[in-house]
Image (cartoon, rainbow, N blue to C red):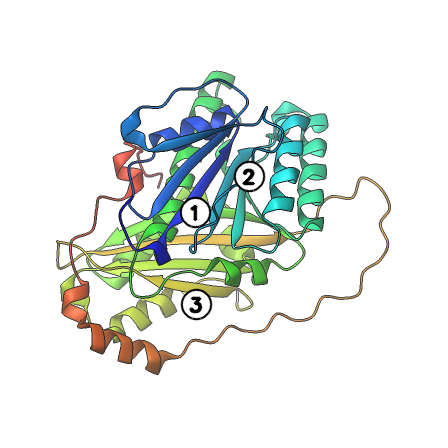
Amino acid sequence: MTGNKMNEMMIIGLGERAGDLISDLPKMNNFAKLIALREQKRYSRESQIKTINLKERMPWRELWIPEGGIVVLSDLDNLERGEDLLKLSKKLNHKKVIYLLIRPHRLEGDLKLNRANKIIEKLVENKSAVLCLDDEVLISDMSSSLDEAFTKMKSLIAQSVGFFVDMLREMGPVKINLNDLRYLLKDDYGVVNFAHGKGRRINDSVEDLWSSKLLGKSRDLADVGLLYMRMGSAHGDLNVLHDLGTTVELACPENCQFLRAYGEGFSEPEDIELWVALIRINKLEATRPKPSRAPRETMKKLSYDEDLMHMFLRHENTAGLMTKLKVPTYKRLGIKVEK
């Protein structure tokens, strides 16, 4: 595998659904893709996907943890999946790991949903950082047929995963640190919505971002935001980056704390492109009485050394950073962006 080892990350998929999603992701030099399955599944050699058989006694024993961290992708459809997640969380305790989980939709019944919540609760007790996709936007049209609804949900899940991978995989001058995200989640879990926007001007790109139906209610209720920005050479001034980030953040609640990342630009000099993840911190619905907890301390605002970033970009030559990037993941997957 090529690429800077400091930027290498790993995706671990648990279950058939995660295996299908990851097999569709394109080859990315700064990602190691690894699927853990109980089911027999074959992948082409070109995909560079390594499989681990969970029937082995200690499948995680020699698991490599890259410097950039790990994204664990899984559904929560059954107890067996929950057991696998809990074993993995013990192996990866206190590491740079984010769990991106797909909960059963309420159409699948309270039994499945309550079971999924119990799995999430145990993961959080293990100090795992958990994000769940917003199932309300995955099936939002209750007038559609069951087949249509679940077909569209599968596409939207793939699109959301593609957005998340795009936000983390780029080797730009400023990246999102997974430990910062873990800190902001504290001892709770987050419901996350993803969106993408593009335009030739700041206002156009931001309006395109906020028009996405994938955001649901998150814009008004978000506690944490991840913002990834990249633009062509015509917008290379750092003031544009600052104004762009401020414009996005001002449209969210005042208490929403953002982590920003910057990419390396486009071949098209006029383009501005944005990815955002908005996270609502959630308490699990209590299925039994719980002891009261002391009020959580107010989260400290994360500060950024703007001068340091200016020095870094000057040293590395800003014009040289605005190079042509690979086509984004969601485009390579052939997924239509929801508006």
* Residue visible at 55% across and 22% down in the picture: 38
* Residue visible at 44% across and 41% down in the picture: 11
Q: Identify which residue, 3 or 216, lies in the foreground.
A: 3
Reading the image, the residue beneath label 3 is 250
Secondary structure found at label 2: strand
Is disc 3 surrounded by few (<14), some (14 to 19) or many (20+) residues within 10 Å? few
Distance between the Cα atoms at labels 3 and 1? 18 Å
Is disc 2 surrounded by few (<14), some (14 to 19) or many (20+) residues within 10 Å? many
Kind of residue indicated by mark 2: Leu
Kind of residue indicated by mark 1: Phe
Task: Check the image and name the residue furthest to the bottom.
Answer: 307
| Marks 1,2: beta carbons within 8 A | no
Distance between the Cα atoms at labels 2 and 3? 29 Å
Question: In this rendering, is residue 158 above or below 199?
Answer: above
Kind of residue indicated by mark 3: Leu
Reading the image, the residue beneath label 2 is 101
| Marks 2,3: beta carbons within 8 A | no
Residue 194: mark in rendering: 1
Secondary structure found at label 1: strand
* Residue visible at 60% across and 30% down in the picture: 104
Q: Is residue 56 visible?
A: yes
Image quarter of the N terminus: top left
> Would residue 271 be found to the left or right of residue 139 on screen?
left
Image x and y of residue 329, in percent = 30, 41
Image quarter of the C terminus: top left
Residue 7 lies in what quarter of the image?
Answer: bottom left
* Residue visible at 13% across and 54% down in the picture: 268
Image x and y of residue 307, in percent = 33, 82
Sequence-wise, the earlier of marks 1 and 2 is 2
